[in-house]
Image (cartoon, rainbow, N blue to C red):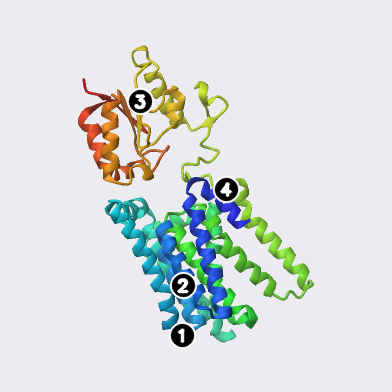
Amino acid sequence: FSIASINVWAGGFAYYNTYGVLLQVAMMALLFLFLEVKKAGYLIIAGVVAALLFFTKQTYGAFFVPAFLLVVVVTDSEHFLYNLKLFLVPLFITSGGILLYFFMQGGLYQFFYDCFLFSKEVKQHAVAFLANRIVFAPLLFVGLRIFFKTQSKNKLGVGALGVLTVLFYFLLKPNRLGRLESYLLDPLFYYHVAIYIIPIFILVSIKWFPRRVRRQVFALSIFTLALFFGSIASGYNDATIQVTSPFFLSLCTFIFSSIEMRCFRRTLSFYLFSGIFFLIFVLPMLIGPIRNVHLVYGVYPMNVLNNQSNLPKLTGLRISAEENKDLTVLTDYFSAPERKNSSILCFPYCPLLNVLLERESNLYFSFFYFETFRRDDQIAQIAQIRENQTDYIVIQEKGSIEPEAHYEDERLKDLEEYVHLHYKPVLQTKNFTVYRKDK
């Protein structure tokens, strides 16, 4: 169910999330097999999978691979160096082979740009959010550990000290209280808190679990946190619920199955409490975005979809007022008699305009990642723009329709420079700029 939900929801806009989670699940399975039978081949394959994980989604690899090594150290510390060699050698060989292929194809620079400079711009808004949770995790772990080890008569004092520490944190910057208030009104906040705190709580109380499952519970807790950090590196959003579900729901299954309930039979308590918890957890997967505060990856909350478009192609669809206005302006502009047969190209990718205007794109390829990965690809497309005599180019600006549109400016620098050199702006809306070819 977890993998299916990722593919349907998160995979709907970013398929690499699904691939990344599948690769992490494969690494976990290989680790458990290795710890069970001690066959080197499982760690070697895990190293190959880890390399693929890095190239699939870098934030997943950056957090999951160290977490994987941490689990190996804790569960088999006697042979750590040998295990490390079995894992890292195939990881570096596989990574080196992929990088060599990029170099031979002339795309090595573009790869590093996309992975670091481009990603840095895209994820810059999430750095503080991620850093805050990374720093707080060990503090929370130590605080809970001290609290549980303290004698009963001193627990109240330790708890009061923890509360004062939290208050001091907010007093340092009072504006944090405003942010906290907005979070408390957001149902998504409580899902994030659960995925963040429950694994840390379990790591502190690992001895409460039966000895036979401690290794699995420890690994799942570490992997859940790693995947949580890897996901929130892209921002505070609903996708974190989906991508962490394979590990988090498995972890919760161990919790419910290990707790002895006094007022119910054990089997009844397991089905009752796990069923209720799973139902609450999967609600976002079943009903889509549950928030009405922010936009989520271009998906508008229902209170924003308050306009019925008059455009024939959008009959029956509800869209935002801003999107409705911009699309109406563009449609009216290009429907004028003098522009009715003009050729149009949208930059970097907005195929809806071609549908609304009933015009084929004046370029066979779009400007998406796979088709402009190398600089030579952009030069080839510039030649096609010249050859096809493109009359108008519509540039999608950063706005509510595509919040990340401006991140393509640097990656597609050659194309953008060509547009600005040979075309001039003739129409501007909040989300689009229309350029006409200089006569």
Side (left or right) of 396 relative to 188: left
In the image, 299: left or right of 273?
left
Q: Are there few (<14), some (14-19), or many (20+) residues within 10 Å of tag 3? A: many
* SS class, disc 2: helix
Could you tell me which residue is drawn at 34 percent across and 19 percent down? 342
Q: Is residue 25 above or below residue 201?
A: above
Query: Mark 2 or mark 1, which is nearer to you?
Result: 2
- Type of amino acid at the residue the image marks with label 4: Val
Residues tagged 4 and 3 counted as in contact (Cβ below 8 A): no
Q: How crowded is mark 1: few (under 14 residues within 10 Å), some or many (20 or more)?
A: few
Pointer 2 with pointer 3, Cβ within 8 A: no
Quadrant hosting residue 349:
top left
Q: Where is residue 55 in the image (x, y as percent from the top left)?
A: 40, 58
State which tag comes first along the sequence, 1 or 4.
4
Residue 292, disc: none
What residue would you read off at disc 3? 344
Return the mark for residue 79: 1
Q: Do the residues labelled 3 and 1 touch (CB within 8 Å)?
A: no
